[in-house]
Image (tube, coloured by chain):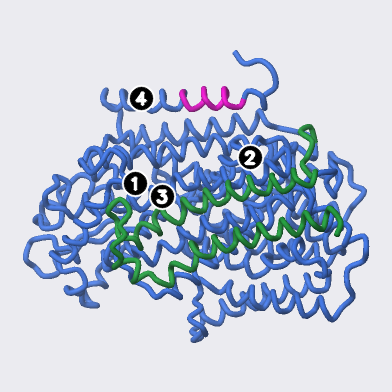
Chain colours: A green, B blue
Amino acid sequence: MSKQQQHWEKTRGLLFITLAIWFVFSIGIFFFGAEMESSSIRPFGYPLSYYMTCQGSLGIFVILIFWFAGRQEKIDEEFGFTEREDS
Amino acid sequence: MIKGKFIDNLPKVYGIYTGGFLVFIILMAIAEQAGMSAKLIGICFVAFTVAIYAIIGYLSRTVQVDAYYVAGRQVPTVFNGMATAADWMSGASFVAMAGGIYFKGYGYMALLVGWTGGYVLVASLLAPYLRKFGCYTVPDFIGTRYGGNVARLSAVLVLTVASFTYVTAQINATGTIASVALDIPFGIAVYVGLASILLCSMLGGMRAVTWTQVAQYIVLIIAYLLPVFWISNKMGAGVFPHLMLADEVARIAELESQFGLGTVKNSAADLATVPKGLAGITKAHSEVNTTPWKFISLAVCMMAGTASLPHVMMRYFTTPSVKAARRSVGWSLFFIFLLYSSAPMLATLSKLSLMDPNLATGIIGKSIADVQALDWYQNWNQANLMFVSDFNGNGTLELNEFFMGGKAVVLATPEIAGLPYVISGLVAAGGMAAAMSTADGLVLAIANALSHDLYYKIIDPKAETAKRLIVARVLLVIIGFAGATIAALEIQGILGSVIWAFDFAMSGLFFPLVLGVWWKRANAQGAVAGMLLGLASGTAYLVWVRTGGAGFWGVTQLTFGIVGSLVSLVSMIVVSLITKAPDAATQKMVDEVRVPSGKTVLGKQH
């Protein structure tokens, strides 16, 4: 397998992990709105359903993108596909 | 004061700008104490900020193609994040979102999740690859990746339909704010709004829009956060509202049951006396009040729409590198998060201010005559955004007898909570900034697609640079005027048009864009089928539901993108597979796009 194919394999792997996390917090948990509402987990005292729609999921997305960008940079570095700074 | 290149001095330039703006707010506050009228303060805020944007627009004028289309590809990560956030957060986010949460609660917050979650798709599926491609516009990518004018033209069509639906809503919003702040009729205010939008973009294209959008972000975020923090502290609800309003949310639930929310219903005859567009509180503040599918389908449409809207995507063409494009998406979402996470807090504070009899500002349970004598009530009643009526004739204002327009939550809350008028002026300037920045991005996206993809790539490939840029500017003005003319007709509400725009974009562009990068076998025939059939079926579904059709799968006129994009996906795969695979050159091009290093696929100037 060529270097480029290996790079793409890894990139794709990262994509699947990222999309899986994204799916859980953008779609998955909202199947359980009623359960979240009656849950005893109450971040900062808010009902869990309310908190996730106001801040929880949103904040997780921000962190997820930065984490994804960091991992992708590592993959690019590993295979020598990082851009030159001046390009 | 500032030496060297503008780009190297960005933190300093915008630091001074922010400081200057804060000084301006303080000066206005002093002027208010000295007796300046509320109306004059409003005019000063809007006129001053718009003048600054126009100056930035003028200073960023350019005659270079790559500066005009992609700001010379040298916008640093964090600043591009701010510009994208302003580009993204429209009049709907700024003026209407908190109101939507106020009235509809949990069900509405699907939009919050959708409008942020979409950025994960942008970062992982598209932005870095399209940046590597080196295109000027979204149809530029489609046209080159799939090859052929038909594909390019189809992309231009989808882009125009989606962006135009969106831009009329934004020009409408600038008109609304300008008409309130400057006290002129809406029909004229729309064109005042348009003139300010064109001032920012006409001379410098993307470069000018970028630097005005950064300036607009700073104004809009100050204008949104300052009142939220101020009201929260004034009310004693918490120093940092986002983490400290749990008691207030619980208190609202308590008051809701005390005031008989959901048990006391208004008769149809009573409701008929309420002015159009105003609503009472009928849904509980924090309860889960919708089915999972309704919530999820709306969120999915907004997410896929985010990843297909060209005015957002083209912001990531302006970064210096692929790596910067990726990080820039993170920064964009961070800056968006600052406002979005505050909107529910504003809705909570606003509702409690009005409802809680223990607060001086509470009006529910007071005598109707007292409420009608309130200064702010009279103002907003006159603006057709507030209404009370003694339906049960007991002389006391009940929860079901108070009505408000969605915009009033953001625009009127500072006044209701007893903040000085200077804050209301600031909020008006913020709303104007939000609507203008989005309108600028959209008008530019349409004009660029038409001038670059339709005129230069298809009609006259030999056109000289000067001629290309003149065509681009003429188109900008024409599209702006067309948008303003339709906005003046007021066909659909601001929020409704915005949601439609997402569904249109998702129907026609989501899968052709994503599969262009992630599926090598996708070819031109498939992409054209995907774009046209997706757009057509989505539109047909919308028309069908709007004209009384029953719909299926619980897909409504707000989520028709689900139907459109499914048709798009299936037809794209089927047609691609029954026609010839893309040639070796195209396959190689896709390989090129997938690695960050090396030259862009399209040259620096094309």
Q: Which mark is residue B209?
A: 2
- Discs 1 and 2 carry the same chain letter: yes
Q: Tell me the SS state at disc 4.
A: helix
Give residue B260's position: percent from left, percent from top: 15, 69
Residue B601 is one of the magenta-drawn residues: no
Give residue B158's position: percent from left, percent from top: 69, 65
Q: Tell me the SS state at disc 2.
A: helix
Q: CA distance from mark 1 to mark 2?
A: 32 Å
Q: Residues within 10 Å of mark 2 (few under 14, many from 20)?
A: many
Predominant SS of the magenta segment: helix
Residue on which the image places disc 3: B341
Give residue A29's position: percent from left, percent from top: 44, 67
- Discs 1 and 3 carry the same chain letter: yes
Q: How many marks?
A: 4
- In the picture as drawn, the residue positioned furthest to the top comes out as B1
- In the picture as drawn, the residue positioned furthest to the left comes out as B394
- Discs 3 and 2 carry the same chain letter: yes
